[in-house]
Image: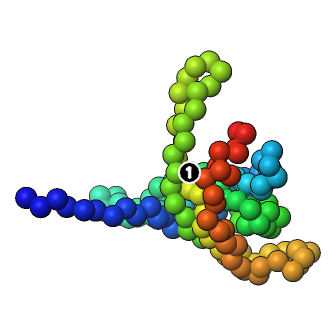
Amino acid sequence: MAELRLGSLNYIAVMGRLTHDPELKYTPKGNAVCNFGIAVNRRWKDKETDEWKDEPSFFRVQTWGKAAERCGEYLKKGCAVLIEGRLRSRSWSTQDGEKRIVVEIVTNRVQILDKLSPDAEAGPEPGVVENIDIPKEQLDDIPF
């Protein structure tokens, strides 16, 4: 049997609303990183009861560089966004020795779907905030 060669694809696109205000931080080397959460809803009709039901899912999102600074400046809790990126899993041990694992979306693109308030300075209305590819050495620079 011939060896089957498979490529790999790591791509995700979700649309939802921010669950909390973004947290903008800077690494010790001065790289901006912005973290926030989004809620995505799946609405479906129960065939037995004929009622509509909601199934929310919650995702952690991380963006870098200028895109991180713009997200920190323009996004607020409840803002509607379209997120495109890739999934990344990280693990660490707590001070108590417990192992923790998180899967998060690292963005390539954040599209703001809401109109921004009139006092927002020359920001996207709605608009797109894009990341460039983040070098691995910047990912190793995360202190949290």
Where is residue 14 shown, x and y percent of the image? 53, 66
| Res 138 seen here | yes
| Res 37 seen here | no
Few, some or many residues within 10 Å of mark 1 (<14, 14–19, 20+): some
Q: Secondary structure at mark 1?
A: strand
Where's the N terminus, which quadrant? bottom left
Camera-nearest residue between 85 and 2 = 2
Name the residue rendered at 68%, 52% in the picture. 138
Q: How is the image coloured?
A: rainbow
Where is residue 103 shown, x and y percent of the image? 52, 47
Q: Quadrant of residue 83?
A: bottom right
Position of residue 122 relative to residue 18, above or below, is below
Q: Quadrant of residue 47?
A: bottom left
The residue that label 1 is drawn on is 104
User: Would residue 27 be found to the left or right of residue 37 on screen?
Assistant: right
Query: Residue furthest toward the top?
Result: 96
How many numbered circles does the render carry? 1
Name the residue rendered at 55%, 64% in the picture. 85
Where is residue 19 shown, x and y percent of the image? 67, 54
User: Would residue 46 be found to the left or right of residue 126 on screen?
Assistant: left
Name the residue type under label 1: Glu
Where is residue 13 shown, x and y percent of the image? 51, 67
Query: Residue furthest toward the left?
Result: 1
Where's the C terminus, which quadrant? top right
Name the residue rendered at 73%, 67% in the picture. 67
Position of residue 103 relative to residue 11, above or below, is above
Name the residue rendered at 87%, 80% in the picture. 122
